[in-house]
Amino acid sequence: MADILNRFEEIGIEETKVDTNKKIKVGIIGTGWIAEAHYYEYKKMEDVELVALADIVPGKAEAFAKRMGIENCKFYSSHKELIDAGEVEAVSVCTYNRQHAEPTIYALNHGVNVLLEKPFAVTLDECIEVMKAEKKSGKVLSIGFQPRMGENMKMIKKIVDSGELGKIYYLQSGGGRRHGIPTPYGTSFIADETGGIGAMGDIGCYSLDMLLNAVGYPKPLTVSGYTSDFFGKNPEYYTWDNKPAQYADKFGVDDFAAGFVRLEGGIILDFRISWAMNMDTPGDALILGTKGGLRIPSTDCWNGDFDKPLTIYKDVAGKRVQYEIPLVKNGEPLFYKKIRSFLDACKNGTAAPIPSSQIIYNQAIIDGIVKSNKINREIEIKIPEI
């Protein structure tokens, strides 16, 4: 068994090599809390100049700059004003979900590279329009899935690609939160007019990316979906956490979702995600193959790393065995890697590190769950050629 383990124990952690001779001017559209994470990583990079901030809320961009200690930066009241100023080569789109598509399309149409925070958008139709703009522009569009940069996340794909599990036929997403509707950040996550989708768009897309990426992002074919909002619309949920009970009136998205998805290649995906439920976890994530199975330890949201090792289950010489894959250190923070890989693609003219051609399948599943839930039956997922 030691020989098998040795095949997976050593993963080279690549050093980031940065050409500081060429600086890239960037802007941030939307200055909410996720923009802080983008700024913290941008300011570490010697080849980056943050020159512009935009927010539709009067004074919010200026307050963000003051709070972060940002100097020599221009402020704009819309993404159009920022882009039209013509100073930036790249932007981070950090708006709420329902405003992901519009500024991204505008930036691409004006020759600006985009790092778009997850989820891709709210609907599949929006994603298609973004990809049309991307194709026409020839610029870099990368979607903000920093967990993909983690060494232990990479290990999942490495195990599958090695053939150790055989032909993959079943995926189970697992994970989710027992009590974690993100109200500390106001109502932008939970209101329909801003969030559009709830737990699925916030953390479900992470678990989908983890599993779909591991098996090569097969195209989704059909989905039978379910969503609910029992906790989000319950005023008592918020009073327990000393939050305004009025949040229940604002709640207009999913706090729990599940889907049964058929993928190309004869793979079944059993998906579930939760912001709130009366259970600690619906289980670990699983990848089942004809030669072995992989257990991925449950987390609240799959947005970073694991605190327990991966476990492989196999039959060896007629014996049932299982063995752990040791955890690997990540080196640089995952958010740094996300932004660094995007900037490198912009500077070097290389492919987007997290391409829209993959993440549209992720979004198609979420979109399909929403549509299936509305009509209470399985639906076919149709994604046009772009």
Image (cartoon, rainbow, N blue to C red):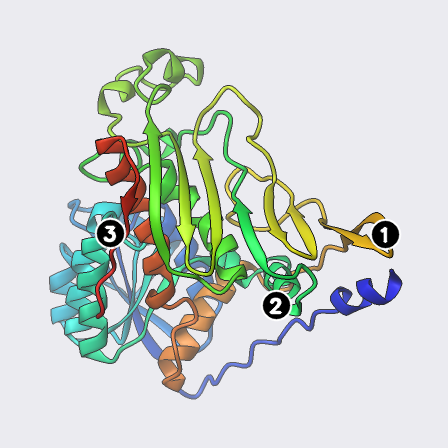
**Residue drawn at point x = 42 percent, y = 59 percent:** 264
**Quarter of the image holding residue 8?**
bottom right
Quarter of the picture holding the C terminus: bottom left
Q: Amino acid at mark 2?
A: Asp
Nearer to us in this view, 82 or 97: 97
Instruction: Return the mark for residue 318.
Output: 1
Nearer to us in this view, 73 or 309: 309
Residue 24 % position (x, y): 34, 78
Which comes sooner in the sequence, label 2 or label 3? Answer: 3
Q: Helix or strand or loop: what does disc 2 sit on? A: helix
Nearest to viewer (mark 2 / mark 3): 2
Nearer to us in this view, 159 or 81: 159
Q: Helix or strand or loop: what does disc 1 sit on? A: loop
| 340, above or below 303, in the image | below
Q: Residues under labels 2 and 3: Cα distance?
A: 45 Å
Quarter of the picture holding the N terminus: bottom right
| 336, above or below 230, in the image | below
**Residue drawn at point x = 24 percent, y = 80 percent:** 138
Q: Helix or strand or loop: what does disc 3 sit on? A: helix
Instruction: Determine crowd level at label 3: few under 14, some 14-19, many 20+ residues with C-alpha closer than 10 A.
Output: many
Residue 357 % position (x, y): 34, 67
Nearest to viewer (mark 2 / mark 1): 1
Contact check, label 1 and label 3, Cβ < 8 Å: no
Which comes sooner in the sequence, label 1 or label 3? Answer: 3
Q: Amino acid at mark 1?
A: Gly
Residue 44 % position (x, y): 49, 67
Instruction: Return the mark for residue 61.
Output: 3
Residue corresponding to mark 2: 161
